[in-house]
Amino acid sequence: MPPYSPKIGDSLASLDTPSMIVDLDLMESNLAKLMSQLLPTGINIRPHLKTTKSALLAKRLVAAGAKGGCVAKLSEAEVMCAKGFSDLLITCEIIGAPKVQRLVALFREYRSIRIVVDSEEGAKAIDEALGQSGIGEPITTLIDLDVGLHRTGVQPGEAALKLARFVASRKNLRLIGLQGYEGHLQHIHGLEGRKKLCLESMAILTQTAEALRNDGHAIEVVTTGGTGTAEFCVTVPGVTEVQPGSFLFMDTDYRNAVGSHNYSNSLTILSTVISKQGPKTVTIDAGLKSLTTDSGLAECKTKGYVYGVLGDEHGSLTWEDEAGSGGLELKVGDRVEMIPSHIDPTINLHDVYYAHRKGVIEEIWPVDARGKVQ
Ligand code: PLP
Ligand code: MN
């Protein structure tokens, strides 16, 4: 036995820190909320697995009603397939010879892989490589459409029609639909404003789908949406699929935008106070390598403390009241739970999830696709 090896049935108190922990009651309630809200609409739920990077959780989402999953990157798809989960849409464009070769190798084994393209160059390279592979079966392909995010995606109108004709003309690509992700709207505060802008993006998406159909293409899949917008996307006729990811665990950025009435923060980083730096300041063992800061600073789950970054490995917690007077005093050795500000890149910093119920570890899940950014 290694000197430290956490097991099922251990208490959170016995875990070393920093550790990524999941409150199973809260996570299950987030999942039940999403499914009960979205499944009755009949829309396909294809959760984005860039959040969890876990094949085990992908299977759990499917058991709850999801159909397939999305991954951002080809390397995530490779990991998920190897772990027995291959009903996947890769939502980023696959560009460059090394990636195209890897895609061909993956598709040879797993024919259920779906891809998106937004350029003739990209589509042509994949078509040619598949042609040379001798696989003899076209890969399921969606046109990625820019619905306002201006990240990837062909422009609506003539450009989309031209690309669709190009894809349809390639023997090794089978055009089945459109992806239009409105990522710029996910975190807009206020339900009404977010809904209005989302419906505008959905109009671009569904009108383009209609234009492609009128041009003779069989557009069966229209996929879109994230945690902040899925509830609006599913109300739009013509949308067939949504891709929420963060809802399972949430983060402070999403909580502030979407509101706590919706989903709870079910994942935290358990951390230890390792030094006292004054009457109202302590240092904890979670810094930039445990909690990302691109979307603001993490929050302590216990109210009253303010987090600050003290570098790669350290953070500070400060409080207002005099030490001891408001019951806020933290001492060396105390434990705190930190709520990440941005869930996806924070998970990517950790090897495993410790999933607990009321403080007792029930499951330990690897972050299978950790670091898979290619
Ligand atoms: N779809 C695509 C293409 C994405 O890039 C993302 C996240 O960035 C999502 C869906 C899921 O969004 P969220 O995690 O905000 O629910
Ligand atoms: Mn994110």
Image (spheres, rainbow, N blue to C red):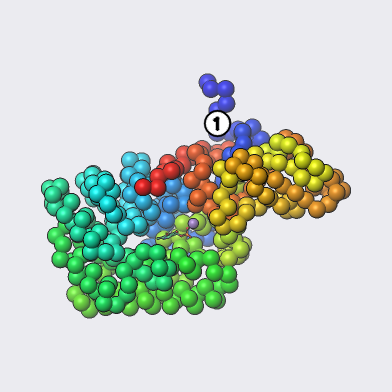
x then y, percent, for residue 311: 62, 43
Left or right of residue 80: residue 283: right
Residue at point 27% right, 73% down?
A: 159
Could you tell me if residue 26 is visible in this image?
A: no
In this rendering, is residue 179 above or below 321?
A: below
Q: Nearer the viewer, residue 323 or 176?
A: 323
- Is the residue 143 above or below the residue 277 in the image? below
Q: Residue furthest front?
A: 311
Residue furthest to the top in view is 1
Is residue 146 visible from the viewing direction of this image?
Answer: yes
Q: Residue at x 80, y 46 (%)?
A: 280
Q: How many marks?
A: 1
The image quarter in which residue 153 lies:
bottom left
Q: Is residue 210 left or right of residue 250?
A: left
25 vs 116: above or below: above
Return the x and y of residue 218 as percentages of the image width and height: 22, 70
Q: Is mark 1 within 8 Å of ligand 1?
A: no
Taking the spot 40% from the left edge, 47% from the top edge, the residue there is: 373
Left or right position of 88 against 298: left
Q: Tell which of 372 and 207 is nearer to you.
A: 372
- Which residue is rendered at x = 48% and y = 76% of the image? 197
Residue placed under numbered mark 1 in the picture: 7
Q: Secondary structure at mark 1?
A: loop
Q: Note whether 248 is above or below 337 in the view shown.
A: below
In the image shown, does 125 or 109 lie closer to the viewer? 125
Mark 1, residues whose alpha carbon is within 10 Å: few (<14), some, or many (≥20)? some
Q: Position of residue 265 (x, y in %)?
A: 59, 54
Give the residue type at disc 1.
Lys
